Image: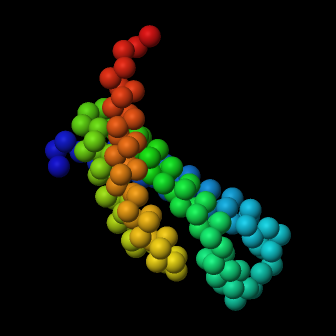
Amino acid sequence: MQNISIRAVILATLAVLGIDIVSGMVLTQMFGGPAWDAGLSREEIQRAYQVLMQDVRYLALGLLLGTATTVLGGYLAARLARHMPYYNALAFGVLGVLISTIGAGSLPTWVKVVGLGLSLPAAVLGGHIAKLRMSRPAS
């Protein structure tokens, strides 16, 4: 635990959560179109959300973007920690899995399984990229 920078992991997590929220809003607008109006009732919003949860394109693109932000988060955690990049990236990935498990909601099971299965490798990949960039000589 002494090799993990809690500060780096938390900052990377906050950055990725922000990016995920914005990308989720953009995806919802892309696939929901003008149907997502501010004047919708709670029931209408729930029905529209259920329709989105059946759209494989929406789910696959969300999974792809989520995996990409997990790589970014692993990278950020490793770079911010400045030491033990793999440990810090892995710690970010574990925290991400915990958060995802709590907040997965009504996602289809296949999305949950694939997303959780990709989380740790994606985070460690981000840490690996950070390690490669840190070990490169300055030019």
Which of 56 and 10 lies nearest the eye of the viewer?
A: 56
Q: Residue at point 47% right, 73% down?
A: 110
Residue 48 appears left or right of 3: right
Residue at x 35% of width, y 66% of height = 98
Residue 128, picture quadrant? top left
Q: Where is residue 64 drawn, in percent x and y?
A: 55, 56
Q: From what the image shows, is residue 48 above or below residue 96? A: below
Q: Is residue 41 left or right of residue 53?
A: right
Residue 111 higher or lower than 47, as above or below:
above
Q: Between residue 90 and residue 54, name the one nearer to us.
A: 54
Q: Quadrant of the C terminus?
A: top left
Residue 129 visible in the current orientation: yes
Q: Which image quadrant is residue 21 in?
A: bottom right
Residue at the extreme bottom: 43
Q: Is residue 8 left or right of residue 51?
A: left
**Can you tell which quarter of the image residue 120 is in?**
bottom left
Task: List x then y, in percent, for residue 47.
Answer: 69, 85
Q: Is residue 5 above or below residue 64?
A: above
Residue 96: x and y in percent read 38, 59
| Residue positioned 46% across, 77% down in the render | 109
The colour scheme is rainbow
Q: Is residue 72 above or below residue 97?
A: above
Residue appearing at x 44%, y 64% in the figure: 115
Residue 5 in percent (x, y) is at 27, 43
